[in-house]
Image (tube, coloured by chain):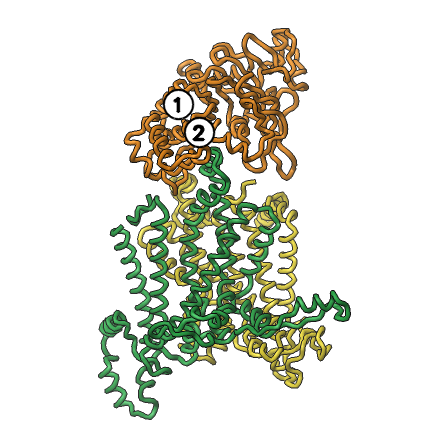
């Protein structure tokens, strides 16, 4: 029984792979150098961020490795630099390259975590609203409207401020990563919910859903087996943009002091801590992490743009 | 028209009701006014008496109604840090924020419409590609980072020498790439009082120079979004049958672009864009922090750091009110521009 | 010389993988006041032909060759400004879907006045007066009120009347109507068609009517073209073609009409479907669907699969078909000489 299962499982995988190879997605990817470069840069950045503990010259969380005398050293191409610190050091004498690698890791973890939460909330609420309609729909969509009209950043700042006030600064710092995931996840779910609801409404009126209902399938089965797969491509497209947004939101919160503490910095808190030294001429402490953040967000946005052009049937007119 | 207004008003009140519940919940759970009023040394019995006197032991509904009744009269209590009525504190900071938002809005509209329209009319021109490239980079730069870069370039100054300085062209290029800085990037300077408590940066040339960098960085967050939105909508409108028909009528291209297409393009832009302008208020928190611009956003952040709960609550209520007003205005303008909306609340 | 003379019109769409030819060797002419029908399945190139007359083909499309001679002028060689003067003025168009054709944010009056002002130096007041007169001509109820209404306040049939009024505004020589009734309710279709016919006759306006409805063509037009896969395959007086179609495809079209079927039996469909333009079969584009590639004696006519057929004259009609040519055993006429 198990052998037949595994052999049968192998067949669809192979056909899926060949279907992907023949797909329009891959075809247009091969013809788009911007998308290729973006993907390459993105993979490299995620790679170095994930491997930060092995790649970074020093551990910025380890106070014993910090040499306060080596603070505010410039990067290698400027006079007065120390070859031990390629990108220079920050005001506390931490190696900037190491803090950036670790910071990118924190930013990416929060970005992806928050988007996973948004997607979970948004897709569930969107499916519920679109499929059940009536009061549930009205309530959820009104809530989404209010939240969106306030701008997600505002909601994140307010929720962040309140959580911080409620738990106190020290506790907030200790649990900053899960809290930020929660805050950004709660702030941005309406994007998903609206899109999913719209596709559900569009799909629901199609004949195959009627057919499934006539055949006596349960609502849940119709929703997950029949409607959800058809909403996947818009979900996929927003997800890329949302990861970029979540990373920016995290950076903004950290910059305002509502995010990652300086002892455990993300790219945003690195920019914040460096900003205090910009007047004294040490621009690199804030601008090098800033450049890293921009490149990371930019490649994600470029990939998102490309995906939208390829997957969106409204734009795909030949 | 009246039915439309009533419906909008009902919506607005509903939203304000939700906001007030949230604000009240915050005040009820986070602030302990007794602590703030009397400090640690007062014995518990006295605190209890004070609590009773202030009505803090009343049922939730009674307390909320009291809160809402005061809120309607713009009475949100006293700020702990300023020792003044919170509304007064807000009113003092409001003009700075509104002027910043107004200046940014002006920049956004003045730049995004021509650029968006141009890149839709000539989608293949190198200038359009350039604008689209810049706008996607612009979207990817957080507003506070734009602000920092602007400060570095225009306030602090950049001096680079990548080219040999001993040659004439090298020195010239080095000079061209370097900046002197010197633009004001801290606070509002010396704004001129126009009336009441309204100090304006628009009233003097010097005041305007203080406004430039903050307004540009605040605009930078929305400008790319608007350009892309206008371009996308315009491209779609230019594909429409009525534009083809207008061409078949022999109308000039200029009239087709600016009368036939632009008006239809602006309809969705007004809805989406109007709301976005409202959300600029949220981004002022970041811009004002970087530039130490003494507006509501900076005040709010300070209030958070000092746990000034009444001020936080007032800010939320006022900003909520601003959002609700912008959204209502946007709907109203949309209804006036779009003939298919008869302002009865139902699109025809 | 006819009012409009189209010779060897060649229209292509520049796609990334190369050009696709949408029209090949299209030739026809139109006398003043004459009504011509262009018939074919969707995708045959009828609309492309109509839009290319005023050089209004959408972007990747362009006129690659041939000539469009109109009243002493060569339209393919004309500047954009010159063409603009012809559009809406000497030749005007009626589009398929009246719900999409009028600009939703401009009033009917604005859309009529701008057209007049684009071609004549007149005041808004005069332009409104002319517009009102045209709205009266198309028999719209309470025409003066319509001028200040927006399109969404009018029904589909009324909007198509407005569009006909716009087409007539400057007393054009030719109106090109691209399936003008397809998007309307069946009950209104006949009304609109009758109105269009009446106005064209009354004002001696030429009409190029694009449709797939052979019934309408036979009622309205004097001459007709049948198009298949970007090519004209048969043309001549409408009555002769309808009564005695020569080309196997035209025969198939007419046999496919519901009234030609025996009651209770299946409709006479043409087997297969039209090939896509970027992948045309060799020889005659119709040969894979044609029942006459095999001769009556069972032998195969190789010309059908190998050579693109030229036109032959049969009565007052011209037909591009090897079978007809063989049957008539006539001299072939090279395409250049067909007018």
Note the chain letter of the yellow one: A
Dot 1 corresponds to which residue? C196
Question: Quick check: can you spot residue B323?
Answer: yes
**Residue at 76 percent of width and 69 percent of height:** B164
Q: Colour of chain B?
A: green
Quarter location, residue C172: top left
Q: Which chain is orange?
A: C
Q: Nearer the viewer, residue C16 or A196?
A: C16
Labels 1 & 2 near each other (Cβ < 8 A): yes
Answer with mark 1 or mark 2, whichever residue precedes in sequence: 2
SS for dot 2: strand
Residue A253 is situated, as x and y percent measured from the top left of the image, at: 49, 71
Q: Nearer the viewer, residue C201 or C98?
A: C201
Q: Chain of mark 1?
A: C
Between A235 and A256, the residue placed more toward the observer is A256
Residue occupying the point 22% across, 73% down:
B62
Chain bearing tag 2 is C
**Residue assigned mark 2:** C94
């Amino acid at each position: 029984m198990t052998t037949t299962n595994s052999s049968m499982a192998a067949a669809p995988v192979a056909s899926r792979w060949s279907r992907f190879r023949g797909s329009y997605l891959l075809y247009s990817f091969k013809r788009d150098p911007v998308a290729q470069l973006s993907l390459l840069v993105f993979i490299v950045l995620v790679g170095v961020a994930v491997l930060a503990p092995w790649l970074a010259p020093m551990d910025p969380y380890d106070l014993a490795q910090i040499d306060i005398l080596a603070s505010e050293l410039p990067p290698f191409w400027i006079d007065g630099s120390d070859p031990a610190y390629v990108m220079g050091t920050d005001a506390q004498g931490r190696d900037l390259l190491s803090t950036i690698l670790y910071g990118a890791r924190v930013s990416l973890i929060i970005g992806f975590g928050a988007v996973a939460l948004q997607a979970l909330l948004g897709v569930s609420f969107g499916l519920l609203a679109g499929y059940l309609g009536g009061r549930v729909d009205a309530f959820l969509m009104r809530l989404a409207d209010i939240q969106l009209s306030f701008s997600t950043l505002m909601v994140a700042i307010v929720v962040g401020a309140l959580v911080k006030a409620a738990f106190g600064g020290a506790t907030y710092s200790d649990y900053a990563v899960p809290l930020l995931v929660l805050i950004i996840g709660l702030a941005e779910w309406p994007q998903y919910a609206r899109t999913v609801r719209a596709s559900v409404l569009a799909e629901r009126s199609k004949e195959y859903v009627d057919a499934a209902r006539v055949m006596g399938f349960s609502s849940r089965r119709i929703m997950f087996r029949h409607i959800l797969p058809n909403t996947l491509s818009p979900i996929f497209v927003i997800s890329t943009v949302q990861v970029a947004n979540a990373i920016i939101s995290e950076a903004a919160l950290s910059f305002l002091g509502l995010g990652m503490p300086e002892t455990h910095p993300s790219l945003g808190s690195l920019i914040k801590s460096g900003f205090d030294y910009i007047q004294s001429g040490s621009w690199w402490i804030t601008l090098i992490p800033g450049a890293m953040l921009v490149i990371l967000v930019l490649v994600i946005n470029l990939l998102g743009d490309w995906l939208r052009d390829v997957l969106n049937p409204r734009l795909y007119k030949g | 028209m009246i039915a439309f207004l009533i419906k909008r008003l009902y919506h607005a009140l509903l939203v304000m009701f939700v906001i007030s519940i949230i604000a009240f919940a915050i005040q009820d759970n986070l602030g302990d006014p007794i602590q703030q009023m009397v400090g640690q040394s007062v014995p518990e019995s006295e605190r209890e008496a004070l609590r009773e006197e202030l009505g803090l032991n009343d049922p939730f509904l009674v307390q909320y109604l009291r809160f809402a009744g005061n809120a309607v009269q713009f009475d949100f209590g006293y700020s702990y840090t300023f020792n003044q009525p919170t509304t007064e504190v807000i009113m003092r900071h409001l003009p700075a924020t509104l002027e910043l938002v107004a200046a940014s809005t002006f920049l956004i509209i003045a730049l995004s419409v021509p650029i968006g329209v141009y890149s839709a009319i000539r989608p293949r021109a190198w200038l359009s590609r350039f604008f689209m490239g810049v706008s996607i980079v612009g979207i990817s730069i957080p507003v506070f980072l734009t602000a920092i870069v602007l400060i570095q370039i225009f306030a602090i100054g950049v001096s680079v020498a990548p080219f040999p300085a001993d040659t004439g062209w090298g020195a010239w290029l080095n000079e061209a790439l370097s900046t002197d800085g010197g633009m004001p990037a801290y606070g509002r300077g010396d704004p001129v009082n126009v009336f009441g408590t309204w100090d304006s940066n628009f009233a003097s040339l010097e005041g305007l120079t203080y406004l430039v960098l903050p307004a540009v960085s605040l605009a930078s967050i929305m400008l790319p979004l608007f350009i892309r939105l206008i371009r996308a909508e315009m491209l779609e409108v230019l594909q429409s049958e009525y534009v083809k028909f207008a061409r078949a009528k022999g109308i000039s291209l200029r009239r087709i672009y600016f009368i036939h297409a632009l008006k239809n393009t602006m309809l969705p832009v007004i809805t989406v864009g109007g709301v976005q302008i409202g959300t600029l208020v949220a981004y002022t928190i970041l811009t004002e922090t970087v530039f130490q611009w003494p507006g509501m956003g900076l005040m709010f952040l300070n209030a958070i750091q000092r746990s000034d709960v009444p001020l936080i609550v007032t800010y939320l209520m006022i900003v909520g009110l601003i959002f609700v007003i912008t959204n209502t205005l946007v709907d109203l303008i949309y209804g006036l521009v779009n003939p298919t909306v008869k302002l009865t609340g139902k699109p025809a | 010389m006819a009012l409009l003379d189209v010779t060897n019109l060649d229209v292509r769409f520049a796609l990334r993988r190369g050009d696709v030819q949408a029209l090949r060797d299209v030739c026809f002419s139109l006398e003043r006041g004459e009504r011509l029908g262009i018939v074919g399945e969707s995708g045959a190139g009828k609309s492309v032909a109509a839009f290319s007359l005023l050089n209004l083909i959408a972007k990747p499309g362009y006129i690659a060759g041939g000539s469009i001679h109109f009243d002493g002028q060569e339209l393919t060689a004309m500047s954009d400004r010159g063409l603009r003067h012809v559009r809406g003025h000497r030749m005007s168009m009626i589009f398929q879907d009246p719900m999409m054709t009028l600009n939703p944010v401009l009033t009917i009056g604005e859309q009529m006045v701008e057209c007049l002002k684009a071609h004549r130096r007149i005041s808004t007041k005069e332009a409104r007066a002319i517009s009102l007169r045209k709205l009266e001509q198309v028999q719209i109820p309470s025409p003066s009120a319509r001028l200040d209404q927006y399109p969404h306040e009018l029904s589909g049939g009324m909007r198509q009347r407005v569009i006909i009024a716009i087409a007539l505004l400057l007393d054009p020589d030719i109106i090109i109507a691209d399936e003008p009734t397809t998007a309307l309710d069946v009950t209104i279709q006949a009304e609109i068609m009758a109105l269009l016919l009446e106005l064209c006759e009354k004002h001696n306006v030429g009409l190029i009517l694009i449709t797939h409805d052979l019934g309408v063509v036979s009622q309205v037009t004097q001459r007709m073209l049948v198009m298949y896969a970007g090519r004209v395959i048969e043309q001549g007086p409408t009555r002769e073609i309808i009564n005695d179609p020569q080309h196997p495809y035209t025969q198939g079209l007419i046999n496919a009409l519901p009234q030609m079927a025996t009651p209770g039996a299946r409709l006479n469909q043409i087997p297969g479907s039209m090939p896509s333009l970027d992948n045309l079969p060799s020889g005659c584009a119709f040969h894979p669907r044609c029942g006459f590639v095999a001769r009556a004696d069972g032998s195969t006519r190789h010309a059908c699969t190998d050579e693109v057929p030229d036109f032959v004259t049969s009565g007052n009609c011209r037909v591009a078909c090897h079978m007809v040519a063989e049957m008539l055993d006539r001299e072939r006429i090279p395409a250049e000489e067909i007018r």
